[in-house]
Image (cartoon, rainbow, N blue to C red):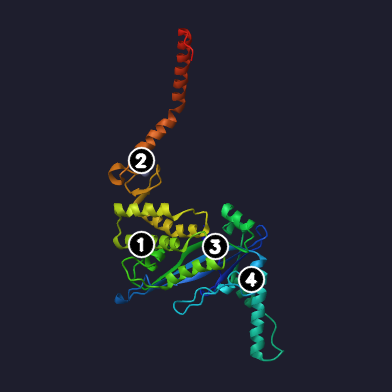
Amino acid sequence: MRKEIINRIKCEDESVRIEIFCNRQYKGYYVRGHIDTIQDSGSVHDPMRGLFGSINYRFIITVLVSGTYQERIKRGKIRSFQRDVGFERWNAESMFAWKTQKEFIDERKRWLLAIRRKRSNSRTYNRHIPEWQEEVFRNENLVIDLDEAGITENSYLEESVSAKKDIILLDMDFFVDEIKLTNGQEMRHYLKRIYTIPAFWCPQEKEEFTLTDFYHWFDDLYEILYFNLGYDYLAKRKYNRILESTGRLGHEWIESNTISKHYLKRLNQLKKGIGDSTYPLTNFCYKFFDDLIDDLTTQKQIVKCQNCGDFCKYYRNKKFCSLTSDGKNCGKSASNDRDYQAHKPERQAKAAEYQRKRRALMKKLGVKK
Ligand SMILES: [Zn+2]
């Protein structure tokens, strides 16, 4: 939905975090966000055959912050996540600092002048900031419209606002931004998918438990949301379970390129178990699942039953679960239901006519009710 925000990025340096601002406020809150680039070079590597590649993902997160949160940052009341191993992805202490674009650019200028002053070692350093330099600072942030922020007026948001939370999670998304492959390396269709992240990086049952960088990344994300944003609508165990199950189903599909009855059953179970997607983190988990579903649908493996909503095995022109392949006859019950709806007025008229005749007969016979 908000991929076009990413297309507006002008900063060429992928390691720079893009700050998101908005010129309009929502119920006294400032809209803030980040766009991070995350590189995965593992799932497209094949050193045996001399093939190397990488995928750049963009992660986008939006929140509402109040001045109180900014105070919390200044007082250092933000939990940091320093790691001995793995890559340092989050600088949690400065997440969503600055309320406006102007505040951000002014601070970048102050930072530049402080460096110059230090280097020149005197009071007479050059205070002029050229236009191109300001341009660089401007490119490190994006100003979005209020309707791009991912604000959905639901009970989650209402509760959070009335509880006067100083920071409220709005929305998160993952996109594939760039795929780099060496010559001769074929483009596998699933590389442009995001479900490959849990598929390749979340620990698989059969494999040895390895703490990969991406695994750390998801872990850190949860901790930051929980500790610094006070987000506790999804238990850590469930969060891990959803990602791992999605990962396992994605991995199996990539490996075998076909799906079984048992696979469909697990797919439907997972869908029912993810939970209420009006909560932003649950919704985020759905994105990986939905991407897998989209791939399976595009690759003509599954169709969504128009009666019960379950995923069932694909056949041409199939719309419902069928008794032979899916164990239930949704087409028949749906047509019965349609039949019932279509002939409802007719049946009602018939019933009324019957009642009228019955009353007339009773009257004739002198029977009291
Ligand atoms: Zn069905």
In 3D space, how far apart are the residues under numbered discs 3 and 4 (Cα atoms)? Answer: 16 Å
What kind of residue is marked 4?
A: Arg
Sequence-first tag of 3 and 4: 4
| Residue 204 x/y as whole percent | 35, 66
Residue 78 placement, left or right of 252: right
Question: Callout 2: helix, strand or loop?
Answer: helix
Pointer 1 residue:
248
Label 1 CA crowd tier, 10 Å (few <14, some 14–19, many 20+): many
Mark 2 residue's CB less than 8 Å from ligand 1: yes
Q: Is 326 situated above or below 91?
A: above
The residue positioned 58% from the left and 71% from the top of the image is 95
Q: Quadrant of ligand 1?
A: top left
Sequence-first tag of 2 and 1: 1
Camera sees residue 84: yes
Pointer 3 residue:
231
What kind of residue is marked 1?
A: Arg
Residue at the far right in the pictured view: 123
Question: Callout 4: helix, strand or loop?
Answer: helix
Q: Is 364 situated above or below 185?
A: above
Residue at the far left in the pictured view: 324
What kind of residue is marked 2?
A: Cys
In 3D space, how far apart are the residues under numbered discs 2 and 3 (Cα atoms)? Answer: 40 Å
Task: Confirm or deny contact between disc 2 and disc 4 (CB under 8 A).
Answer: no
Question: Callout 3: helix, strand or loop?
Answer: loop
In 3D space, how far apart are the residues under numbered discs 3 and 1 (Cα atoms)? Answer: 26 Å
Task: Confirm or deny contact between disc 3 and disc 1 (CB under 8 A).
Answer: no
